[in-house]
Image (tube, rainbow, N blue to C red):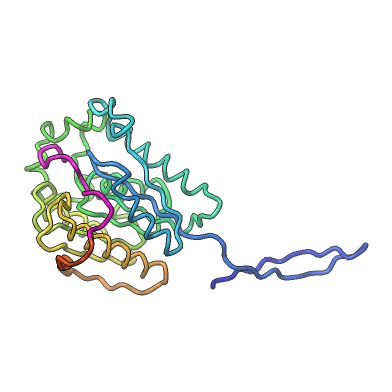
Amino acid sequence: MPTHDELVDIPVGEQHIAGTLVAPRTLIPGVLFVHGWGGSQQQYVARARTLAALGCVCLTFDLRGHVETRSQYETVTREHNLHDVVAAYDVLAAHRSVDTTRMAVVGSSYGGYLAAILTSQRPVKWLALRAPALYKDSDWELAKRNLKAHQDLEAYRRLPVRPEESRALRACTAFTGDVLIVESEHDLIVPRQVLVNYREACVAARSLTHRVIEDADHGLSEAPWQQSYTSLLVSWLSEMLFGAKISKQVTQVKPPSAEAPAPTELPENPDSPSTIV
């Protein structure tokens, strides 16, 4: 178990003697989960419990415009939701057991986009992006739900985008921690070009791992795909926690066999594909 030393002053009568207090390191990594548009924190509670068992403090939360604040769905903007992510990060970082030098952020789809931008505003050591979405920098204060049609995202996401053209990609360019990018092989919402844009932006990352979940769709609508993602995430973060060196690589991950038990987490995005942007 890692330890830390602390010099202490020991009063003895009218004198003082020097000592060194050696104690177990009590601070542990913090992991923030950011769900996608149309999702909720409940989709990540099971994964958070798994990672907590590894020795992490995990936080899931609902972005504004979802669940109890669903009434704001029509008006919430990216600016609002970015503030949500920063506020959630600050709550996690303030936890008495969290080591703020070892913070991980896990984001899916829209949550991955917000997580990337977060790294430009708060210290993050590990960044995991599953099918991260991409938006034009324009219309920042336009209601989020209107971006798909207003920005013609279906066409935009099939284009090469340079980091200087995207706030999220610029943040990735400056990020110097470890990165995990997870792609769904048959993603009709976030096509491969978006993943390429993110991957190519991570030029300063200490390590970059890219995985492809075979046959999976954007929302991981089948249990084996969810299991594959959970396994990838837990395995990668375990390597990060224990300091294993990860080489830059791209592989495909086959879903578990049909005999594998169904996970307890929900599909990544419960809405229909046409509403997920």
- At which x and y percent is residue 81? 32, 36
Where does the magenta region start and end? 262-277
Closer to us: 221 or 4: 221
- At which x and y percent is residue 124? 40, 54
Left or right: residue 114 compared with residue 13: left
Judge whether 226 appears above or below 4 on screen. Answer: above
Closer to us: 69 or 224: 224
Q: Residue at x 45, y 55 (%)?
A: 57
Left or right: residue 16 compared with residue 150: right
Closer to us: 65 or 124: 65
How many labels sit on residues? 0
The reply to whether residue 204 is visible in this rendering is no
Q: Residue at x 39, y 45 (%)?
A: 121
- Residue 165 is one of the magenta-drawn residues: no
Name the quadrant of the N terminus: bottom right
Q: Residue furthest right?
A: 14
The reply to whether residue 133 is visible in this rendering is yes
Res 244 quadrant in image? bottom left
- At which x and y percent is residue 222? 15, 55
- At which x and y percent is residue 44? 31, 50
Res 199 quadrant in image? bottom left
Left or right: residue 190 compared with residue 77: left
Q: Residue at x 19, y 32 (%)?
A: 145
Q: Residue at x 20, y 64 (%)?
A: 211
- Residue 270 is one of the magenta-drawn residues: yes
Dominant SS of magenta comes to loop
Name the quadrant of the C terminus: top left
Closer to us: 153 or 183: 183
